[in-house]
Image (spheres, grey):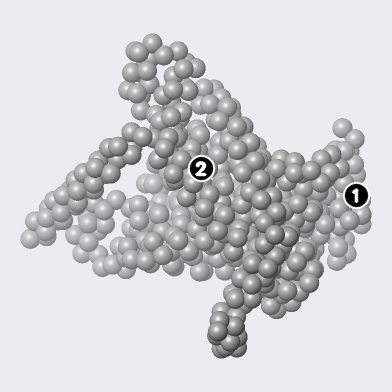
Amino acid sequence: MSLLADVASWFAQPEQWSGPGGIPVRFAEHLYYSLLALLAAAVIAIPVGLLTGHTGRGGFAAISLANFARALPTIGVLTLVVLGMGLGLVPVLVALVALAVPPVLVNTYEGVRGVDPQLTDAARGMGMRGREVLWSLEIPMAMPLILLGLRTAAIQVVSTATIAAYVGIGGLGRFIVDGQSQQIIEQILGGALLVVLLALAVTTLFALLRRRVIAPGLRARSAASPAN
Amino acid sequence: MAEPAIAAATSAEPLWGRAVEAWRWGRHNLDDPVGPLLAEHVLLSYASVLIGLALAVPLGVLCVRFRAFYAPVLGSVNALYAVPSLALFFLLLPYTAFSPWTAIIPLALYTLAILVPNVVDGLDQVPHHVRQAAVAMGFGPLRRLLRVELPVAVPVIIAGLRVASVATISMVSVASLVGLGGLGGIILTYGFARDFAAPVVVGIALSVALAFATDGLLVLAQRALTPWARDRGPARRRGRAARRRAADTTAARAGEGAAA
């Protein structure tokens, strides 16, 4: 296929690999926005999910909020923040965080909520306090779902961070947008391919993380039923 | 009478003022851009989800029958899901131009990442004794699939449809960057291009409202498609909840006993 050859030759051009518009810089920008957004979403969503799941209070409100955020059109959020505070990093981050919070929040909440009450009873019976139950029982038990939520969010963020190009702050979306305006199909394909590679790297990273973070006693079961 | 009240509210509360401004803009432009673009949004999102479902059901059935297919199919739909929608829209433009297909094809492909696993999980959850009963009644494989297995899988499939439809409705707007994003058109052409917040608020509000309305429709569809759950469901659920509560108190009592 000649298109594949075109994409390969696009990647082979030395000018793609240097300078402020080169692949390494765009890749780093893309990674930076994605990480920042995911980190912000985790800082917001994980504590809320843990707290509502642990206490059982406010769960309905948290899930409703997550469903509302899920329904928000990313383009709309981005445009609204751009109109409010101009082009730049903040609108992209707000839009990406709004995208990443729902899966993390819902999975954290469900993970903690889904812990067998007999286990929490047993933990309390052993004399654990609420905080100890949360840290040494509920969080380890919920970890597979929390990681799943983070992975879903990370893939959506990596794929959607392409819109950063529209508000003038680069990222891999630049190749896609410029490829379209200059009608260089292989550049669009190259940009898309780089985003997919980043998403695959994210998937691999989470598979490795699973192995390290999930308690040994839970591994067999979580591998058997990865869905919630 | 109403005018000064609104004006006062506008000056007192900027957020409320924004909402009032958006409401007025939406009312005023209902016939021209808002109505038709909302209709386009409905068409693009519903067509995408329905086509996605039409692809996901046979794919899911295939994956259940031939288990070896499942891992590669899941891998490819997940990889597809990671392709930025913008890139797919741009890549399709030379072939489908500004026809609705430019938006529908990528959006339908994205739904597969959500729908295929749900179809497989739904079919996996059909109890073995139900399958056996169908075989004993003389159902062949196809009739068993259509009359027993898929209906039993409906709640799980609809759960997937709910996630897929909300995701699709919020993603349609991205297609406005290639000129066919339904409500995204209001956001970009009337909001972004004119530096005017009211259309953006209207676009977001209608998109969210459409997502919630669709979700409600799917819940109703599930009730209609699973009459057995509706007839006995609440009573049984209440019974199960009561049983669980009883079990909890027994467990708690047992815990007390152990502590004592």
Q: Inspect this view and state whether residue A208 appears.
A: no
Q: Residue at x 43, y 29 (%)?
A: B151
| Badge count | 2
Residue where numbered disc 1 is placed? A184
Pinpoint residue B184: horizontal percent, then vertical percent.
Answer: 70, 58
Identify whether A103 is placed above or below B162: below
Nearest to the observer: residue B9 or residue A198: B9
Label 1 element class:
loop
Label 2 element class:
helix
Pinpoint residue A78: horizontal percent, then vertical percent.
Answer: 68, 67
**Chain ID for label 1?**
A
Pinpoint residue A94: horizontal percent, then vertical percent.
Answer: 63, 69
Nearest to the observer: residue B26 or residue A7: B26
Amino acid on which disc 2 is placed: Gly
Q: Which residue is drawn at 65% across and 67% down?
A: B26
Say left or right for A82 vs B60.
Answer: right
Say left or right for A143 vs B179.
Answer: left
Identify whether B197 is placed above or below A154: below
Say left or right for A226 vs B7.
Answer: left
Residue where numbered disc 2 is placed? B160
Q: Which residue is drawn at 50% across and 58% down?
A: A67
